[in-house]
Every structure is written in C-alpha cells, then in structure tokens.
Image: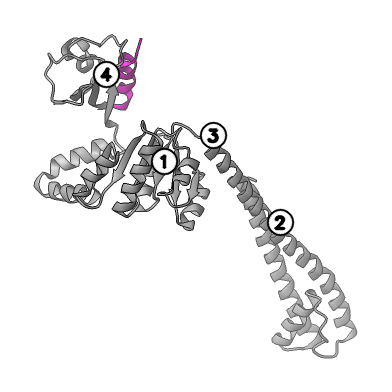
Amino acid sequence: MTQNTATRGSKNIVRALVMLSVVLCVGTAGYMVLENWEMLDSLYMTVITITTVGFREVKEVSPAGRVFTLILIFMGMGIMAFAVGMVAQLMVDLQVRSLLGRRKLGLKKRFIKNHYIVCGYGRIGKIICQELRSHGIPLLIIDYELDAGQELESEGIPFIIDDATSEDALMEAGIERARGLITVVSSDADNLFITMTARGLNPLLFILARGEEEHTEKKLLRAGANRVVLPYMIGGRKMAQIIVKPTVTDFLELTVHDKNIELEMEEFVVGEGSRLNGVTLAESGIRQEMNIIVVAIRRRDGVMTFNPSSQTRIESGDTLIALGYGSDFNKLTTVLSDS
C-alpha cells in the first residue's frame, strides 16, 4: 500500500467531514426557518435525523418540516455512510501497509549479510545509524524498547526488539554473516557482555564498543573488542580543543563532518596489483596530477606515518589518509585498486 493511497484516504475523510458539516448547517437553518425553533433544538433535530437514532421529534413538525426531514434523512444517510466507509477503508489500508512493511523487514532481516549490527538505539545509536545509512552501509538494530521498533519500522530499517546481551538475539541478527557489531547500550557491563558473546559467536567479527569509564576500555579490549570509544572523554577533549585551538578544530570539523563543502578527508587501501605499489609519493603523481594531499599513511602492521615525505614509498596493504575534493577521489580509487 503506497503513501498516495493513505493520502487519498485522508482527503476523502476530510471531504466527507466537510459535506457532513454542510448538512448540519443546512438542517439547522432549515428547522429554524420552517419551524421557528431555536438553534439548539434545530441542531439536535438535525443530528438525530441524519444519524437515524430513532428519538422522538423535539416538537410537532409541520407538513413542510416533514418533507424537509425526509430530504435531510436521505442526504444525511448517504453522507454518513460515505464518511464511515472512508474511515474504515483508511484503517484497513494502514493495517495492510503495516503488515506488508513488517513482512518486507522480516525478509530483509532474514537475508541480510555483510551488515553491521547496532546494539542500542539511543542518542548515540541513532547518530551512528544516520551516518552509516548515509554511506549506504546495511544495518540491523537490536533494542529492547518498543518505541524504537516503531520508529525503525517507519524508516524501513530491520530490527529486533530483544535484549542485545542474549545469544539468541545476536544469532537472529545474523551475526555469523555480519561484517561488524557496534555496541552502544548505556551500561558498561552490558557492552562488555555483548562483546564477549559476539566474539564467541564470530571470531572474525569487527567489534566497536562504547565505554563510559576510562578503566573499562582495557576490559572491553580483553573481552574481544577491536576498538573502544569513550564518548565523554572525546567530548571533553573536543570542547577543550575549541578553546585552545579553535581554528584547527573548525578545519577538522569542516573536512570530516560538514557535507556542504566539497573538501573531504578519506582513506584508501593500496591494492596488490596497483601501479603505485612500490613507488614513492613523488613518483605517484597523487599531488601533482590528482590535486590530492596524503596527510598520513598507515602501514599494514598498523604503524602510522604522519605528514610523509615525498620519498616515502607506497606499499600494498597501506592505507592512505588523503585530503582533497570528492571528484578527484575517484581517480585515486581507480589507481590504487588491483589492476
């Protein structure tokens, strides 16, 4: 059932209500003119007439009033039937849309793979989902709040309403087919338990965990998390940097988070068959030909080289952190990929 169907149903209901209001006004005015009744008596007579409830007449009705009542009955019954029918149709349409939407989400959940499982759909979880969806990354959410399920259903995101610490919930989320798991529930203990359970179910899974306390980071890493983020520490440091280095902070914010400017910072992996494998930055032509600046190189073993010199050699498996314009990144992606 499409959104247009629901819109048409709503318009029909509004149209029926307008017609009903017109009949009420005409009926009230007619009794006031023909029978010289007060407005309340006329309105009451009009309502019980068009709803056919069967109450007795307010007062004795003249022959002209009886003819008017007959006309009012046929008009009112048709409009009332139309209004009730439109309300019933809209309710059925909405129910069908809901059932079809749930079925679609169920199928998506069953066949989803190479996705990220997000445990917790609170304030941080919502921001994570928005960012990942903007990059086309498939998601599946696990949260125990029913309100979260209604919101996710409306957005078409597959979800499971359950306790994320449950092994059954993680299995239902397709953890064996998942690319990674992000646990951002509010409790450090729950994040720790989710990390341990997920690592046991999928030893190769990338796990990103949230920690509230600094001492929790080591525990989460020992439990199997690949990376740990401490939101309060990051937020505090960023606020301090805004005071100490406001221009640097603005530059980083613009290049990383602002989608309204073309300048971007991205990372690229050097493929085994790339023509740049084994050449220096000066020989690669990345700066001269593509107008891209390589600000850092992360080696295959994890060692990070910042502000590499022109004689730094590029090797397969390296990750280049580059600054430039999005239109130029396509060229670099092609050159770095396996030929």
**Could you tell me the amino acid type at mark 1?**
Ile
The residue at the far front in this view is 200
Pointers 2 and 4 in contact (CB under 8 A)?
Answer: no
What type is the residue that disc 2 sits on? Gln
SS assignment at label 2: helix
Q: Which residue is tagged 1?
A: 117
Report if residue 306 lies within the magenta region: no
> Distance of mark 3 from mark 1, alpha carbons?
14 Å
Mark 4 and mark 3 lie on one chain; the one further toward the N terminus is 3
Circle 3 residue: 111
* Pointer 3 with pointer 2, Cβ within 8 A: no
Left or right of 57 on screen, residue 10: left
Q: Quadrant of residue 219?
A: top left
Cα distance, mark 4 to mark 3? 31 Å
- Residue holding disc 4: 317
Q: Secondary structure at mark 4?
A: loop
User: Which quadrant of the structure image shows residue 145?
Assistant: bottom left
Q: Residue at x 23, y 26 (%)?
A: 321
Q: Nearer the viewer, residue 77 or 244?
A: 244
Where residue 159 is drawn, which disc sits there?
Answer: none
* Distance between the alpha carbons at the discs numbered 2 and 4: 59 Å
Q: Residue at x 36, y 9 (%)?
A: 339
The kind of residue tagged 3 is Phe
Spatial separation of the CA atoms under disc 3 and disc 2:
33 Å
Q: Nearer the viewer, residue 33 or 31?
A: 31
> Mark 1 and mark 4: span between their CA atoms?
26 Å
Residue 25 visible within the image = yes
Establish if 142 lies above or below 337.
Answer: below
From the image, tell me which residue sits under label 2: 89
Of residue 278 and residue 217, the one placed in the foreground of this image is 217
Query: Against 334, is 145 above or below?
Result: below
- Residue range highlighted in magenta: 325-339
